[in-house]
Amino acid sequence: MEERERTGFPEGFLWGSASASYQVEGGYQEDGKGMTNWDTFVRIPGKTYKATTGDTAVDHYHRYKEDIALMAEMGLKTYRFSIAWARIYPQGNGQINEKGIAFYRDIIEECRKHQIEPMVTIFHWDLPQALVDAYGGWESREIVDDYVNYAKTLFQYFGDKVKYWITLNEQNIFTSLGWLTAQHPPGKFDDQKTFYQVNHHAFMAHAKAVLAYREMGGTGEIGASFAYTPSYALDCNPINVMAKRDYDELKNFWWMDVYGYGRYPKAAMAYLKKKGFAPHLEEGDEEILKKAAKEITFMGVNYYQSCVCEYNPLDGVTPYGTMNTTGVKGSAQEVGIPGIYKNPANPYLMTTDWDWTIDPVGLRFCCREITSRYGLPIVISENGLGAFDKKEEDDKIHDDYRICYLKEHLKELEKAIEEGCDVLAYCTWSFTDLLSWLNGYQKRYGLIYVDREEEEGASMNRYKKDSYYWYQEVIRTNGASLFDK
Ligand code: BG6
């Protein structure tokens, strides 16, 4: 689009930062919390980098006041965090654990005390193990009622203090890594039929929770957070353009169309029916999905990278290429679906040490696509750079590469706003350093450095990185400092 005069960020824009319970809290057996699928999974040898766990994580469970004070000092407007289902319902359902309620009530009150808007993710991947043992977790439709019961409990206890709700974090990622590539719990490989059924259960859980929120009188903002990897065709060869089209249907619209329209994309559904992988829908499901789509008020976007699409021959690469979890650049393998698409590297873009493409324009592309396709407001619920950081002898952390990453993404976000996108919030991933699921603690994302490595026993002290001060200034000037020479 033609260059125009800058409009800047709207007044009241929610400058935020994010975390997730398993990645920051620790205290995995404290105050009545039940075991989760992740507590179990990380104990299987070879599953995580150097066998790291979130048993103590970065001790947010005990240090949340210190962390929220640091957020307040920075001027943060919103803190996105997730609630651990197993702290509220240790068995997934049944008896409520009052100590779990008290913990999150304290966090919410602490945020409010500092004028920080709490943004709550109801499910960020840590599922009560009891539900896995009882009926296979997301594999059974029984989970829909348990999830809705849990969500309603949160609305009941916290509904008057929380105005922003995210039903599910990255349904596309936890299901893909859980049932297709065996990298997340339950560690299943190439179970496509179950994968699509699990997703349907998750969609129903999301939809019914959204409807329950409204039925309970909730007037706040509610939506799901999607891990959006936008795609570019390799070139104008029609075969590659169709590969992009197929990728979008199968990898992006499959989720966003259900959240935004309440229906599955037709071409993808036709393909899955042919393959025998299409999910089973019960009578009335379509209506519920459609009703819920009318009630969501934003599309949550976790944006890290874009991809390239090229036609993939039938004997081409599979989705099961090695993922880079070590930070050894170049160790990730190309992936794709034979006969449909593959994702080669983008020669125009640089990558992180974990081989993630760095593409600020991709963030604008996401916003534009959502705006034209769904007409919904947008919450950028995650965006950030995983990198090796070094604490110097004077306790300073000079993460200029992170500042550069965030700055370029925010400049593109501002352009998206200028071009008509209604963006409500932007959350950096993450506020403090935390456990990066499969990549241990060495892949750092925070604005705050936490003194811990893969081994347990370090001080866990907090140190402000250069990016902390930089973001503080961005917030203070409502984004104007991004454009300082
Ligand atoms: C998102 C998740 O996928 O990306 C976060 O919502 C995660 O929980 C983040 O930490 C970065 O991914 P990773 O694998 O580098 O930790």
Image (spheres, rainbow, N blue to C red):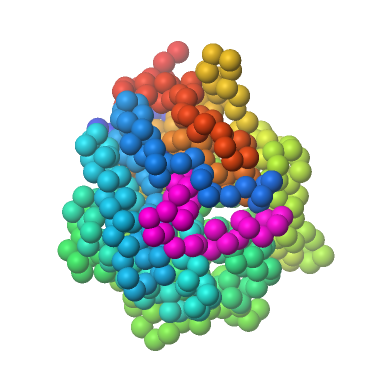
Q: Depth check: 297 or 176 in front?
A: 176
- Left or right: 478, with 182 as reference point: left
Residue located 50% across and 62% down the image: 36
Say above or below: 334 vs 149. Answer: above
Q: Position of residue 257 (x, y in %)?
A: 44, 64
Residue located 49% across and 58% down the image: 125
- Left or right: 262, with 26 as reference point: left
Specify the quadrant of the image occupied by residue 100: bottom left
Q: Position of residue 443 (x, y in %)?
A: 61, 38
Q: Position of residue 58 (x, y in %)?
A: 49, 40
Q: Depth check: 390 or 329 in front?
A: 390
Query: From where the camera sits, is residue 408 visible?
Result: no
**Residue 29 magenta:** yes
Specify the quadrant of the image occupied by residue 210: bottom left
Say above or below: 352 vs 404. Answer: below
Query: From where the camera sits, is residue 434 visible?
Result: yes
- Left or right: 135, with 178 as reference point: left
Q: Position of residue 426 (x, y in %)?
A: 39, 39
Say above or below: 60 vs 261. Answer: above
- Left or right: 475, with 432 as reference point: left
> Over which residues does the magenta segment extend?
21-47
Residue located 28% across and 53% down the image: 102
Residue most extreme to the bottom: 283
Residue located 73% across and 46% down the image: 332
- The quadrant of the rendering that contains the C terminus is top left
**Residue 426 magenta:** no
Q: How many marks?
A: 0
Say above or below: 481 vs 429. Answer: above
